[in-house]
Image (cartoon, rainbow, N blue to C red):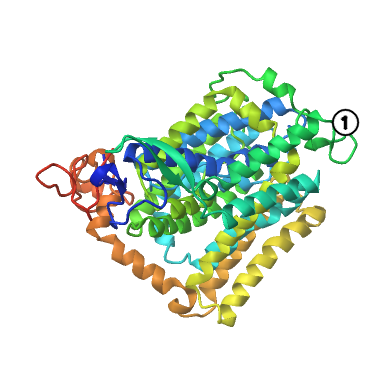
Amino acid sequence: MWPSLVPSRGKGGRSRTATSNNLVYSILDVPPWYLCILLGIQHFLTALGGLVAVPLILAKDLCLQHDPLTQSYLISTIFFVSGLCTLLQVFFGVSWVSHGGPGASGSFKAHELYFPPQLQGTIMVASCVQILVGFSGLIGFLMRFIGPLTIAPTISLVALPLFDSAGDNAGIHWGIAAMTIFLIVLFSQYLKNVTMPLPVYGGDRKCHTSKLYLFQVFPVLLALCISWLLCFALTVTNTLPTAPTAYGHLARTDTKGNVLSQAPWFRFPYPGQWGLPTVSLAGVFGIIAGVISSMVESVGDYYACARLVGAPPPPRHAVNRGIGIEGLGCLLAGAWGTGNGTTSYSENIGALGITKVGSRMVMVAAGCVLLLMGVFGKIGAAFATIPTPVMGGMFLVMFGVITAVGISNLQYVDMNSSRNLFIFGFSISCGLAIPSWVNKNSEKLQTGILQLDQVIQVLLTTGMFVGGFLGFLLDNTIPGSLEERGLLVWNQIQEESEESVRALEVYCLPCGIGTTSCTSSCARRLPFWPRGEAHSLFTCLSQNSSGECPEGTTETDM
C-alpha cells in the first residue's frame, strides 16, 4: 500500500485529480476504476511500437529475418517480461513510468557471433552492474555530475544511429511507409482535439456517453491498423507484386502468413527457453555501455514524469531504488531471453502528459495487459506479420520523437553559451562519426589480443556511449557556472524534494515498509530506503465524516 495519484471520486461519480483539483473531463468522465483500466491499456498501446520494434531491429543480426515464428516467440517473451518489469517498478521502484521499451541494452546491436544463449548470459552479467550502481547509491552520488549536457546526447544517440534501419524498412515500399507517417502525423497533431463519443456505464447517470480524444490517445495504433488493412487489401487484389524480388513484395501481408497457423494459442515464456546462457566478455562491455546510457536516460525520465503528473521530484533514495529495479528487470530479460534489456520508456511519459493522470494503478493495469499478451501466442504471431514498410514508417516517427526527447533536456541549459553549444554539438558529431569509422576500419584498431579488440570495437561502435561519455567528460572539465550548465535548477529541485513530506508519501515503499514497518535504524542507512515517516496507506491522508477524501488531498489507493 502506498499513496497514489489515482483520481478521487468527485460528485456524481466524476473523476477528479486529487492533487490539483483539476477535473479530468478532457479525457473521460468515468468511474476511477474504469479510467485506470482504460489508461493502462492505452499505456501498453503507446509502448507497443517500441516493444515490437526490438525483435524486428535485431532479427537480421540474430539470423531471424527469415524465421517469423521465432520472431513471434520473441515478441511474446518481450511482452511477458515487460509486464513483470512494469509491476516490479510500480511496487518497488519509481512509478508512472512504463518499462520495457527498446532503450537500455535493447539498443545494443548484436553481432553475428552473439547467438541468443550468449546474448542472454551477456545481458544477465551486465545487468548486475546496474543493480549494484542503483542499490549501492552510486547513481545518487553521480547525479550531481550528470546534467542536461550528458543526458541530451545520450538519449538522442539512442535513435539517431538507427536511421539506416528505419530507412531500409521504409524503402521496401515508400508509398506505404509515407501513408503510415501521414496518418500518425494527422492523428497525433491535426486531429488531437477531435472528440469521439464513448459509451460508459457508471456514476449517477448509469448508461451514458463520454467524450474521448481518440486520435490523441491512440494515434500510432490507428495508423498502424489502417496501413495494415490497406496492405491486406492490396495483397488480396494482387496489386502488390507477387515476385519475391520485385519492389514492394515485402509489403504483402501473406509473406509471413503461415506464422499465424504455426504459432500456438498459448505459450508460457520461461527462463532459459533458448538454451543455457553463456557469456562473452566483449558483449558484456557492449551491454554495459548500453546500461550506462539507459541509466542516464532514466534519471531524466523520472524527473520529467514527476513534473507531468504534479508529483514532487524523486529524492535520491527513490532514484537509487528505481535504477536498481531496472537492473533487476534487465536480469529477468536476460534470463527469459528477450534479446534486449528494459528501461523507462520516454514515449509513455508523453502519454502521461496527454491524460494528466499519474497513478500506480494505471501502470498495474498496463503490466497485467502485457502479461496476458505475452501468454497468448497468436497475438505475438499477429504482430510478427506486420508488413515491413509499415514498421519502417513507424520507426521514422518513433526515432524522431526519441531524438527530440533527448534534445528537450537542453531547455535547462544556457544555449547562448558557446561552451554548451560546443559540448553538445561535438558529442553528437563524435557519437555518429566514431562508430561509423570503426565499423569500416575495425582492422586498424587490432591490438593482437582478441578479447581486448572486441571490447574496444563494441564500445566505440556504440554511439550513445561515445556521445554520453564525451558529454559527461567535457561538461565536468570545461569551466562553466552551475547556472550555465543547467545544474543549478536540477540540484535545487532535488535538495528541496529530499526532505519533503509529500515526497516521502509519494515515493515510499509498499505496505508501509520503511515508514510504518521495518523502520530500524540500520535499514534507514541503506541508500535506497525511505528516510522519514509517511502516512499509513490504504487510507486517505485526511478524511471527512463520510469517509471520503476531501478535494485537494492525495488519495491513497491500492
Residue 58 is at least partly visible in this image: no
Looking at the image, the residue that sits furthest to the left is 545
546 vs 220, left or right, is: left
Task: Locate residue 253: give its quadrant.
Answer: top right
Residue 524 at x, y = what percent? 24, 49
Q: Which residue is mark 1?
A: 242
At mark 1, the secondary structure is loop
Q: Quadrant of residue 149?
A: bottom right
Q: How many marks?
A: 1
Residue 404 in view (yes/no): yes
The three-letter code of the residue at mark 1 reads Thr
Residue 395 screen position, x and y as percent: 67, 48
For the point 53% across and 21% down, the residue is: 268
Find residue 225 and report its horizontal and vertical position in percent.
Answer: 64, 38
Near mark 1 (Cα within 10 A), the count class, few <14, some 14-19 or many ≥20, is: some
Residue 178 in percent (x, y) is at 74, 50
